[in-house]
Image: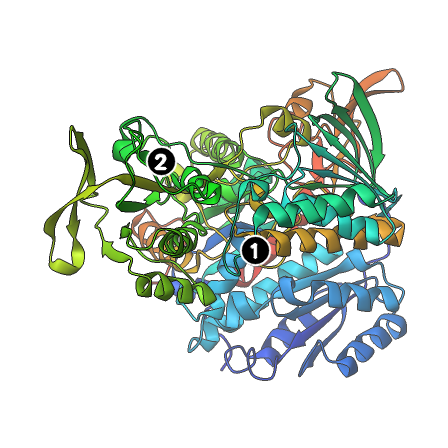
Amino acid sequence: MSAPPGVHASGPRILVFSTNNISDPGIDLAGSAHMHYPASVVVISLPCSSGVKPSWIVHALERGFDGVFIAADGGDCAYLSDCTDRTGKVVQEAQRLLTERGGDPRRLKMAAVCSVCAESFASHMEKFHAALAKLEPASAGGSHG
Amino acid sequence: MSDDTPTPRRIGVFICHCGGNISDYVDVEQVRQAVAGEAEVVTAKTTMFACSDAAQQEMTEAITQDNLDGIVVASCSPKLHLFTFRAMADRAGLNPYRYVQANIREQCSWAHRGEMPAATAKATAIVRAAVARAEASEPLATMRIETQPRALVLGAGVAGLRAALALADMGLTVTIAERAQRPGGWAATFGRTFARDRSGAEMVEELLRRVHEHEHITLFTGAELIEKSGSVGDFTAVLRVANGDTVTLNVGAIVVATGFQDYQPTVGEFGWGLPDVVTLPQYKRMLDAGQGLHRADGRPVKTVTFLYCVGSRQGEEVERPNRYCSRYCCTAACHAGIVSAEQAPGLHQVHLFRDMRTYGKYELLYEEAQRAGAVFLRWDPEEPPVVASDAGGLTVRVKDRLLGGEELEIPTDLLVLVTGMVPRENATLLNALKLPLGGDGFFNEIHPKLRPVETVANGVFIAGTAQGPKTIAESVASSLAAVSKTAALLLKGYVDLEPFVAEVDEERCTWCGKCLDACPYKAIEKVAVAGKEVARIIPALCKGCGGCALPCAENAIDVKGYTDEQVLGMIDALLEEAAE
């Protein structure tokens, strides 16, 4: 009865950075609508996706996450009209750091997820999960997904 | 950043069954056991409904009895009960910002049904991360700011006038600034309007009469906002008024009701530029004039054709398409059809529509227009109508979808392009307000459902069509919503601001100025501390987005509540389960 193998049971572990007002409600909606996405996806919600620090992404991947996904505010951001560009720069900087440290930049993805984009979130997760499973395993992973 | 108290933190964890919404898919007892073993967790309990009075009572008792200095409630999304549990912590004497909500319903049990082991492991990870965040939490205090009992309303259209009257009736002092030389906005130019045929001009006249009589309202025309400084509750607003002078106001809140512009077709777009091709607002003025309908050459109009969706719902064929539906035009065109039939019996009317969006009770107007003799044909955006003109006059060629795409040629005396609404161009205002625009170019609310008139700029509210296409009725409803938010803010006399603002580590900061450039809210200033220039955040102006952190090469900026220590702690905690 005890959860045998833990979260990694369902393959690649994905850390999502979401945003309190835009993408996190979209992710909530995926749950409310009982849409399926891998249980190895976990979420940390922040005020705005342009506030994700590249160092957090590097830390997450080096400590054991197989992928990091930024569920960005996109054009809906209530804080910054150029949020997409700024979040893009976060991604660039994190990928530069990752490459420099021998990591695989493909383990970082970003897409705008709006406050009702439940379906698109679930599908992003399924696809990213599948793509990560095909990469050189960063850690022991199961096969189903 | 954390004080160096050697005493370990004392965290309490409450895990909610949510009836069975969580516990049917997550083994909550197993989650409890897993986190109860964490070093700084002194109490871990499960509860049937964490939000119930009884459960909240139990939590407040635990806070006192176990001397908790942090609390985690693992239940639903924070969008539902964040404030419930913050208030609970506050009642028990625990700093509310030492409470952390763990979302194990929307983001776990509901999303992973039928996978209990995996869902349980994920819930455990989520709760562990929340504990880590609580452990690194600091007591934060809201910032209390006294509010000025005065409001500035931008725009003297129907939304702005209605807002000003409602605010002044509540005892607030109101200044209205209208950019045009005459107040009244669009509604003042309309005769009969749907749904009840009330004249727009008369309605505005009545509102203006009351505004002029009101001792607490001042109306400036030919005036625009050129500068805004200060923050919620206490803004300084500078208007440039008609004679070129400036007027400086001290107001607690600003209502933006600057309205829309009607879409101007480009030359050649559905025959625009040809004689006898007019837009819907132009046609309405012809009707309102009551002089009968005439062609440019003076001959009477026997056939009028309405072409819908001009400037709305555009696709890739346009460089910067207006993708949205303008919402009012289908109904306005049907209504214009009804009025036309009354004024010109025997007039032939053809309405070429894409989809009929006379939503809600306006559907009755669509039916009424049909009964009045208007013929409706539906066209396909793949093959839009084509307008041509020759010596005989205008012809519209259209493939009717209901006739299987058969092409019809409609000779017409007058073609009315049913144009939509577009955002008003107002660079001066945008620059002064620093409000973000949505993808469609209209002002953006914080949340379309839950916070529909608030903007990211605290104390600045949006009303009417400045926010997006609306009918007059919807404009007034949104204007009164903005009034209620404004009055709730100003009548209370003070405002408490969330403390999740950025913070600069002055030891690390070397003042390069990059954070200043990254902040559109002017929330960063340069100060000298012990002979060293450093950046400092102005808390009342900071929105807490964290956008200033990226360019900081020294990693000297954190957002409170989302510090490096907290986020890195959460990442490690999320991985703990797998690492074991």
Relative side of B557 to B377, left or right: right
Identified by mark 2, the residue type is: Val
In percent of width and height, residue B489 lies at: 81, 51
| Residue under the image location 87 percent in, 45 percent down | B149
Count of all numbered marks drawn on residues in the image: 2
Q: CA distance from mark 2 to mark 1?
A: 24 Å
| Residue under the image location 37 percent in, 39 percent down | B311
B348 is higher (above) or lower (below) than B316 = below
B360 is higher (above) or lower (below) than B226 = below
Relative side of B182 to A8, left or right: right
Q: Same chain for marks 2 and 1?
A: yes
Report which residue position mark 2 lands on: B278
| Residue under the image location 67 percent in, 39 percent down | B156
Dividing the image into 4 quarters, which one contains the N terminus of chain B? top right
Task: State the SS at label 1.
Answer: loop
Q: Nearer the viewer, residue B166 or B75?
A: B166
Res B318 quadrant in image:
top left
